[in-house]
Amino acid sequence: TGAALGANPVPLVIPCHRILAAGGKIGGFSAPGGSVTKEKMLAMEGVRVGPPPPAQVSFGF
C-alpha cells in the first residue's frame, strides 16, 4: 500500500492519510512533511490519534 499511497496526487480528495498503523499510531506518510503533515491533516478532521481508551474504566469504590 505504501507505493500506492505515495503516488496519490490529491490526498485531500482521496484520503490515504486516514490509514493508520497498528494500535492507532500515525505510521508513515510519503507526502511532504511526512507523518507531521499526516497528523495535522487528521487533526483538522477531528481525528484523535493514539492508542484507544481502555475498554473498562476502574471505579474508586
Image (cartoon, rainbow, N blue to C red):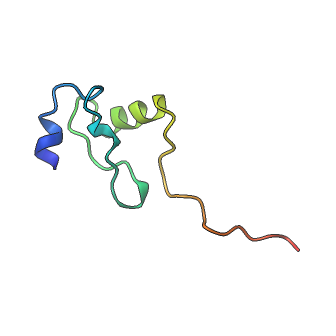
From this view, report whether residue 29 is shown above or below residue 24.
above
Q: Is residue 51 left or right of residue 6?
A: right
Q: Residue at x 12, y 42 (%)?
A: 4
Answer above or below: position of 4 versus 44.
below
Q: Residue 21 appears in which quarter of the rendering?
A: bottom left
- Residue at image point 47% right, 33% down: 43
Between residue 14 and residue 1, name the one nearer to us.
14
Seen as rendered, the residue at the extreme bottom is: 61
Camera-nearest residue between 33 and 49 = 49
Question: What residue do we see at 47% from left, 46% from top?
Answer: 49
- Residue in the image at 61% along x and 67% along y: 55
29 horizontally vs 39: left or right: left
Which residue is situated farthest in the right direction here?
Answer: 61
Residue 61 position in % (x across, y down) = 88, 74
User: Compared with residue 50, is residue 8 higher up or lower down, i.e. above or below?
Assistant: above
Looking at this view, is 28 or 7 the one in front?
7
Given residues 24 and 13, the one toward you in this image is: 13
Measured from the top left, where is residue 47 in percent x and y?
Answer: 48, 40
Percent position (x, y) of residue 46?
Answer: 51, 34
Can you name the residue that lies furthest to the front here? 13
Q: Quadrant of residue 15?
A: top left
Q: Is residue 15 left or right of residue 52?
A: left
Q: Is residue 22 left or right of residue 31?
A: right
The tally of labels here is 0
